[in-house]
Every structure is written in C-alpha cells, then in structure tokens.
Image (cartoon, helix red, strand yellow):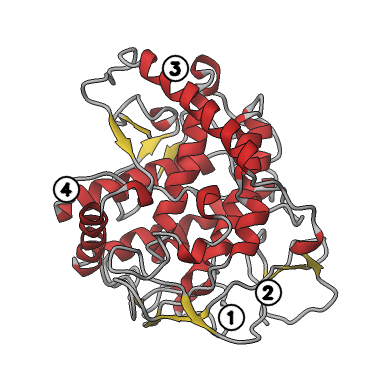
Amino acid sequence: MKAFKYATPAFLLTVLSGAIGCNSLPKLRNDDGVKTNVDRLINTIKVKHRASLGQDGCTTENIVYRREYGSLSKSERLDYVNAVKCLQALPARTPASVSAGTRSRFDDFVLVHIQRTLDIHYTGNFQHWHRWFVYLYEKALRDECGYKGYQPYWDWPKYADAPQDSPIFNGDPYSLGGNGEYIPGHNGSVILPPGGSPIQLAPGLGGGYVRTGPFANMTVNLGPVGGVDGVEPGPDGGLGYNPRGLKRDVGPALNQRYANYTTVLGLLSKSNVTEYRTLSEGVPNTAELGPHGGAHYVINGDPGGDLYISPADPAFWTHHSMMDRMWALWQAMDPEVRNYQMDDGRLGHITWDNNPPSRLTTLDDVIDMGYAGPSTTIGQVASTTSGELCYFYD
C-alpha cells in the first residue's frame, strides 16, 4: 500500500496506519426515486437553456451537443476511440528540451496538466481551466484527427453500481479499454491531507495492467510525478521519458460513495458557486473528495492515481466532460447570475487552497495551455455558449 497526498504540492510515499476508511462515511442514495428527480430537473434545465439560445451568438442552428458515452452507437464510439489513438500517434509539439517524455500530441495535453496542476486545482480557475482544456482536446480530435463527433461524457451515477461493466470500462472493442487485471488482496490508496488524518480509499476490482479493449497494453510516457502504487516517480519531475503500461483499479465503492444520483441532485441544488464547488471538488484535508476526486479514484491505477498525470488515461476526458456538464447545467438554471459568478471563498484564489495566501481569481485572468493549444481568459469560457464556445450537453 502506498500513501498519497491529494491536496498538497508533494505526494507522500510512506505507509501509514490508522487511516479513516471512506466506507466509514455515510453512503449517499442512488435509488430510482432520486434518479427520477434528477432526470426531471435536468430535462427542465435543458428546455430552459434551449429557449435562451441566440442571446450570445450561439443559436439552435449552430449549437452542438456532447453526449453520454454509452448513448453513442458502436460506430460512433469506435470513431472516438480511433481519434484518440490518432492523437497518440501524432508527433508532439513540445520540444524535447522542455520535456523528453512528451512523445505525442496526446502527451502535449498531459504535459500542460503536469505543469499547471498546483495552479488549477482548489483554485478559482479550476472549472474554467478544465473547460478550455477539454474543449481544446475535443478540437484537436476533430481538426487534427478527423473526428466528426464531440467529446462524450461519463455519466457517473448511471453506472455507479458497476462502473467496471460500463461502456467506458467493459473492455469491448468500443470501450476505452477494460479494467486492470485483478490483483487479489491489493489495498486501496491512502490520501494524506495536510494537518488531517490519513484517508484509506477502498480498492477497486483491478489494480493491474489493462489487457482488454482498444487501449490494452497502451504505453504511458510521462510521470508519475508523485508516484503511484508499484510505480516510483518518473525522471525529471515526471517530465522525462518513462514508458510503462496503463493500469486501472475500477470498482463501485468510490463511485457509489462520491458520484451518485444524490450527489448530482445536491450539486444542482446549490445556491451559489462557492457551495457548488465545495460539493463538486470536495473539502481540502478531509475525506469529502467530491465527485471530482472521487471519480478520479474510481479510475485510479497509473496514471489515474496521480493527479498530475491523470489526463494520460483516455477515460480522464469523459470524467472532466461530466464535470463540465454538471457545471453547465447548474449555470443554466440562472445564467444571468451564475455564468460570471466567481468564487470568493476558500477555493477562489490563484494558489492551491490559498496556500500561500493569494488574491482571488478574476474574469480577466489568463488560461495558459502551453503547447496544448492557445490561451484564453476566464471570462471567455465562463459560459459554454459565449466567445468561441457553442455547445451544451444532452
């Protein structure tokens, strides 16, 4: 068992005892009654959003919709898979002098996430930065690899009881690869919040290398930065070349706990962005990971268990598309207020959990994407239907 820091600049690599188990926390409901309420509310939001189109240059004629991965036809899923593989085969734009481990266009996106991790998590730009990040990835799939669709999302609660059997992780030819090979008796990860008790996460149903599906035996080039179970930190702070196989540890425990229908209903019920983000991203230094951290650890493994290099797992992009979907739905409930509302609470600053103390994030702050793509500002991506953006979710 290897220990991690989730909410500090460095990840600890020591074995600890006395951890608080996530299973000791109260479980949230994922029953049909809550699902019915969620579906009803989301349908109402979508009707309202469609009626508002045309006010920001985005109309019913030109808006595009991102869809749930499982709702895509087999041919559509295969098109997406092939586009991701294409991106992994294209040469990197990053010079080797900057990162010797960045070997592909796909890796360009992993690299900028490594470089920016401490500036884009538990910070006021978290939602905006990742919105632009996913959009540029989608744009690269379309413009550089001929993909005709749009970035699909992972509907966390829909598959919470068995995510390993979902269309994303079931290992069939249309999935994003299967779970890792099962390692009997393997332990879950330990998160070490600064100043708090260590948190033991329940293990998934894999833990080993991915051997099924389109991304079986995929090579991960960068990282780990902090180290993950069985894999020591990579050279040059994770920027060096460190080829190894893709690992996952997908299972239901964390999905049921952190990313279920009650979670979704709770997100859409929040009255301001500070409350929304506290539930969505979790409370630093506690076992409340929120659906953001919780779903990351549903994937887990390598690279999924290292926050820095997590975009190196193709499933990352469906997770963060769902993160953006939830925020877009929440914004659409009161767009005049919520589209440009900035967090003025604990997570609203330009440093990780306001450590060291820093100013609040503003709409004029720049989102730098390095070699992944062009920069923009917070204000330009505050809505999915303003500026260059013109999309929503089904």
Determine crowd level at label 4: few under 14, some 14-19, many 20+ residues with C-alpha closer than 10 A: few
Relative image position of residue 371 (x, y in whole percent): 30, 55
Relative image position of residue 124 (x, y in whole percent): 58, 38
Q: Which residue is mark 4?
A: 143
Report the quarter where the N terminus lies.
bottom right
| Residue type, label 2 | Leu
Q: Which residue is mark 1?
A: 229
Position of 292 with respect to 288 (left or right) is left
| Residue type, label 4 | Asp
In this rendered view, identify the residue nearer to me: 287 or 196.
287
Secondary element at tag 2? loop
Mark 4 or mark 2: which is in front? 4
Q: Badges 2 and 3: C-beta atoms under 8 Å apart?
A: no
Disc 3 from disc 1: Cα separation: 46 Å
Disc 2 from disc 1: Cα separation: 12 Å
**Earlier along the polypeptide chain: callout 4 or callout 2?**
2
Determine crowd level at label 2: few under 14, some 14-19, many 20+ residues with C-alpha closer than 10 A: some
Residue at (68% x, 74% y) in the render:
12
**Earlier along the polypeptide chain: callout 2 or callout 1?**
2
| Residue type, label 3 | Lys
Q: Which residue is mark 3?
A: 48
Q: Badges 4 and 1: C-beta atoms under 8 Å apart?
A: no
The disc placed on residue 12 is 2
